[in-house]
Image (cartoon, rainbow, N blue to C red):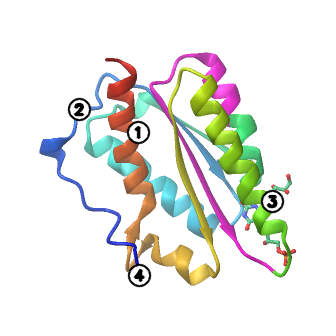
Amino acid sequence: MATTNLSIYNKENLPNAGAYRFGIVVSDWNSEVTHNLHKGAVDTLHDLGAKNSEIDSIFVPGSVELVYAATKLCKKKIYDAIIVIGCVIRGETAHFDYVCKTVTDGVTYLNTHMETPVVFCVLTDDHVQQSLDRSGGKLGNKGVEAGVVAVRMAELKNK
Ligand SMILES: Nc1c(NC[C@H](O)[C@H](O)[C@H](O)CO)[nH]c(=O)[nH]c1=O
Ligand SMILES: CC(=O)[C@@H](O)COP(=O)(O)O
């Protein structure tokens, strides 16, 4: 098992987020997972000094729609980092592969063509238990990880 606990960070080694503005796009598909990821990200941004007034969250139907919404936020040019949050769980068909590919390709495009870093917090799991373990379960919360990454990338964007 490659994953270690995803929620451990040392504030002393991280920048203060008080000067930064964040956008978060959340997929409602598998919301019992994605909304926990969202809470983890928001709580972490707060813990690292982000003001609640500087955190904008929007919700979309599924992970495929994350890219459209993140693109709109990038074009506003008001955010220091954007986090996309989703949970894709494999079913019986190849649809899983296409959903994952469109999201990863879309986020990669944004990170190579826009000015705002987009943090990838999309679980791509074979079973729902894997998702539950990584969204506040025994393996921590990838939303916390995304919050830490967003603050570090916001600092990089402003250097
Ligand atoms: N099966 C999952 C989906 N499917 C829906 C797509 O994301 C999209 O909303 C639809 O294809 C219409 O464009 N989405 C997830 O986020 N997770 C899944 O497991
Ligand atoms: C990731 C998906 O879209 C998946 O939930 C769809 O399930 P199925 O492949 O059984 O239609």
Left or right: where does residue 15 sit relative to residue 50?
left
Between the C-alphas of marks 2 and 3, the distance is 37 Å
Between the C-alphas of marks 3 and 1, the distance is 26 Å
Between the C-alphas of marks 2 and 4, the distance is 32 Å
The earlier-in-sequence mark between 3 and 1 is: 3
Q: Which of marks 2 and 3 is in front?
A: 3
**What residue would you read off at disc 4?**
1
The earlier-in-sequence mark between 2 and 1 is: 2
Q: Nearer the viewer, mark 3 or mark 1?
A: 3
Q: What stretch is highlighted in magenta?
A: 70-91
Query: At numbered mark 4, what does the secondary structure look like: helix, strand or loop?
Result: loop
Q: Which of marks 2 and 1 is in front?
A: 1
Taking the view exactly as shown, the residue that stands out farthest to the left is: 12
Q: Quadrant of residue 155?
A: top left
Residue at left offset 41%, top offset 39%:
150
Residue at left offset 84%, top offset 71%:
94
**What residue would you read off at disc 1?**
150
Query: At numbered mark 3, what does the secondary structure look like: helix, strand or loop?
Result: helix
Residue 117 point in image, percent of width and height: 50, 31
- Image vertical order of residue 137 relative to residue 120, above or below: below
Query: At numbered mark 2, what does the secondary structure look like: helix, strand or loop?
Result: loop
The earlier-in-sequence mark between 3 and 4 is: 4
**What residue would you read off at disc 2?**
16
Left or right: where does residue 67 sit relative to residue 154?
right
